[in-house]
Image: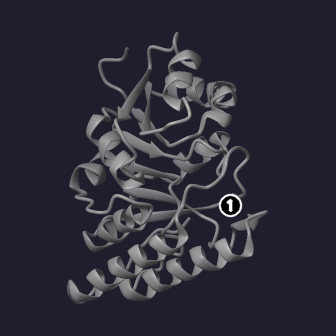
Amino acid sequence: MFDTIRYTLLIPCYNEAEGIPQLREALQPVIEQLMADGGVEVIFVDDGSTDGTGALLQVVFADSPFVRILAHPRNLGLGAALRTGFHAARGEIVITTDSDGTYPFAEIPRLLQYLREDVDLVTASPYHPGGGIEGVPPWRQVFSFGASFLYRLILRSPVRTYTALFRAYRRQVVEAMSVESNGYVAVAEIMARAIRAGFRVAEYPTTLRVRRFGRSKMKILRTILDHLRLMARLIRSGRPAPIPSHFPSR
């Protein structure tokens, strides 16, 4: 293991057994690149899976010393899984992504190119003019785009996408974030808090695709209500900061 690690790749998992056998092959080329660029650790957080996801991860990555598998005794939600992973991460840069191929692992090096010296956080952005959406059900598109549009208005921010897990954070951003939400809304909460705290955000224009394996675990009504509660908290918490004169977007 590296004494100092440049990258932590954090992958939350909940009942993803169907896609675990393909994970290693998909990850390997990226792992090799990150290893050559200062070292990498991979943290899987098994968030109380009941389909054998944790056991499969142990088998598939049994000979990979750079992989750690953390487990919740029961399902606590995506936000809780991110908190667990952030607390355990040792990398200078923390990359978060889904295990299901929504954003291919092969795009990680391109995502990192947007993490320039004047950027603290990069998010995948299908709603950027250079991004796109393929195969995602229309109702999911409306929900995600609508939520991001409202966050943009509330925060008076030029950032277009708030609900994408596929991101790269500098360590100081992770250490500064105190995320309250346990569910999917935690992804938007992190972005909102980062913007309010003055961290510099860049968007990586890319394509959002339908997941390749398994099915979404999102409870849509609960998630909508969680977003509305977060938006209400943001509105109540005070006047948003003015838009910075330099706010990188590409």
Quadrant of the frame with the C terminus: bottom right
| Outermost residue to the right | 135
| Outermost residue to the top | 63
Classify residue 180 as left or right of residue 77: left
Question: Dividing the picture into quarters, in which one does residue 208 lie?
Answer: bottom right
Q: Please report the residue visible at 28 percent of the width from the left and 70 percent of the height from the top.
A: 198
Colouring style? one colour
Q: Nearer the viewer, residue 171 or 63?
A: 63
Observer able to see residue 131: yes
Q: Please report the residue visible at 44 percent of the width from the left and 88 percent of the height from the top.
A: 153
Q: Please report the residue visible at 30 percent of the width from the left and 32 percent of the height from the top.
A: 90
Q: Please report the residue visible at 64 percent of the width from the left and 50 percent of the height from the top.
A: 103
Which residue carries the number 1 mark? 208
Disc 1, SS? strand
Classify residue 196 as left or right of residue 133: left
Quadrant of the frame with the N terminus: top left
Image location of residue 22, percent across then percent down: 70, 29
218 lies above or below 2: below
Question: Dividing the picture into quarters, in which one does residue 241 lie?
Answer: bottom left
